[in-house]
Every structure is written in C-alpha cells, then in structure tokens.
Amino acid sequence: MSLLAKMVEGVEVVALSGRLDAANAIEVRDQIRGLIQAGEGRVLIDLSGIKFLDSSGISVLVGAMKEANSKGGRIALLRVPPTVRSLLELTRLHRVFDTFEDEDHACRVMAKRA
C-alpha cells in the first residue's frame, strides 16, 4: 500500500494504491487522520490505484469521513474502480460519499463548499 498526498486548491488529494485491507488499515487510517487534523479537513481520496478493498478498508474511509465532519470538513472519493464501487453500493455507502472522476472539478467543488 502506498499513499501520496498533495494540496490542490485547499483540498488534500490523497492517492492510494495497492491493497487496503486489515494488514495496513491502521497505518493508512492514521496517515489520513493526520492530514485531516493538520489541514482544513477537506480530503479527496483517489482510489484509482486500489486493487483490493475489504471491510477494514471501508472502515478507513468511514472513519476519515467522521473525522473530517467533526472538523467541519468533508471527504470525497475520486476515480473509484468498478470493484470498489460495487462494494460501496452493496454497503449503501455510495449514498454517503460524493464521488468524482475528474480531480480538478472535484477540488473546485470541494473548495467552494468550505
């Protein structure tokens, strides 16, 4: 699992790649939590590089959303792969997370909702 972060228009864009599962969920959760706490709480999570996501990975996303909401921020998902989208739909989380296909558009939308 790798995590790369960059700031775009006041939004922390976090690109995840590899497997997001029980083996690394705590580490990824802590890294995302640190970004939320250090910034304004607006985080766009790019899932295009995710090859596998289990319930621990879902927990990371939900936990990040709760953390961001408590700070007045928000979490959105970018480029959700079909397998992950199916899991989000199965768990009805597709109704909770805003999803985007274009990073620039997502950052503009998220920056406006600050």
Image: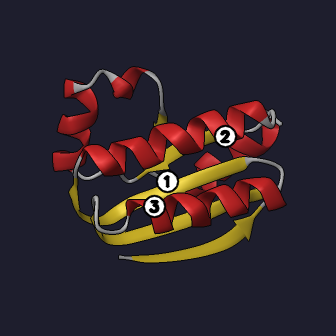
Q: Which mark is residue 102?
A: 1
Q: Nearer the viewer, mark 2 or mark 1?
A: 2
Residue 51 is situated, as x and y percent measured from the top left of the image, at: 20, 65
Residue 31 is left or right of residue 78, and the answer is: right
Circle 1: residue type: Asp
Q: Which mark is residue 67?
A: 2
Q: Residue at x 76, y 47 (%)?
A: 41
First reached walking from the N terminus: tag 3 or tag 2: 3
First reached walking from the N terminus: tag 2 or tag 1: 2
**Residue 88, placed above or below residue 30:** above
For marks 3 and 1, give the CA distance.
28 Å
Residue 94 is left or right of residue 12, and the answer is: left
Q: Can residue 59 be spotted in the picture? A: yes
For marks 3 and 2, give the CA distance.
14 Å
For marks 2 and 1, give the CA distance.
24 Å
**Residue 59, placed above or below residue 16:** above
Circle 3: residue type: Ile
Circle 2: residue type: Glu
Residue 7 is situated, as x and y percent measured from the top left of the image, at: 73, 68
Q: Which mark is residue 26?
A: 3
For label 3, the SS is: helix
Residue 99 is left or right of residue 113, and the answer is: left
